[in-house]
Image (cartoon, rainbow, N blue to C red):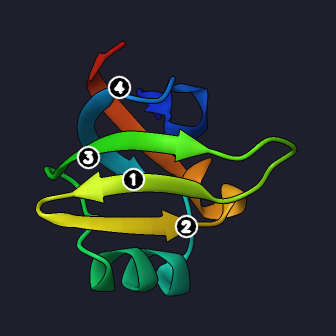
Amino acid sequence: MNGERLTALKAGSSGTVVAIDGGVWLVKRLEALGIRPGVQITKKSAQLLRGPVTIIVGHSQVAIGHGMAKRILLQGTNR
């Protein structure tokens, strides 16, 4: 799959979701949070040592686990 993983971005960077590298449960969980292919998200912050990642989706701020964040692939990232 092409794209840069959300966990690789620096805080303040943004990009468009191109794919979610996971199973049906993960895809449905992220869709419930508004994270789906075609949506632009901005990485607000991340904790050290694989802690939660805070992102901005639309007008909402969401915290997701590191494991979920590393499965979100972005394109057109603004570093």
Q: Do the residues labelled 1 and 2 touch (CB within 8 Å)?
A: yes
Nearest the camera: 51 or 74? Answer: 51
Question: Marks 4 and 3, how far apart in space?
Answer: 9 Å
* Image-based side of 57 in relation to 19, left or right: left
Q: Do the residues labelled 4 and 3 touch (CB within 8 Å)?
A: no
Check disc 4 and report the residue beneath it.
Answer: 13
Task: Tell me which amino acid carries mark 3.
Answer: Ile
Question: Marks 1 and 3, how far apart in space?
Answer: 7 Å
Question: Marks 1 and 2, how far apart in space?
Answer: 8 Å
Check disc 1 and report the residue beneath it.
Answer: 55
Question: Marks 3 and 2, how far apart in space?
Answer: 13 Å
Give the image location of residue 24, x and y in percent: 48, 82
| Residue 75 higher or lower than 21, as above or below | above
Check disc 3 and report the residue beneath it.
Answer: 41
Give the image location of residue 4, x and y in percent: 47, 26
Task: Tell me which amino acid carries mark 2.
Answer: Ile
Q: Earlier in the sequence, mark 4 or mark 3?
A: 4
* Image-based side of 30 in relation to 68, left or right: left
Q: Residue at x 36, y 28 (%)?
A: 12
Task: Tell me which amino acid carries mark 4.
Answer: Ser
Check disc 2 and report the residue beneath it.
Answer: 64
Q: Element type at marker 3?
A: strand
Q: Do the residues labelled 1 and 3 touch (CB within 8 Å)?
A: yes
Q: Which of marks 3 and 2 is nearer the N terminus?
A: 3
The furthest residue to the top:
79
Q: Which residue is drawn at 40% across and 40% down?
A: 43
Q: Element type at marker 4?
A: loop
Q: Which of marks 4 and 1 is nearer the N terminus?
A: 4
Q: Residue at x 25, y 63 (%)?
A: 36
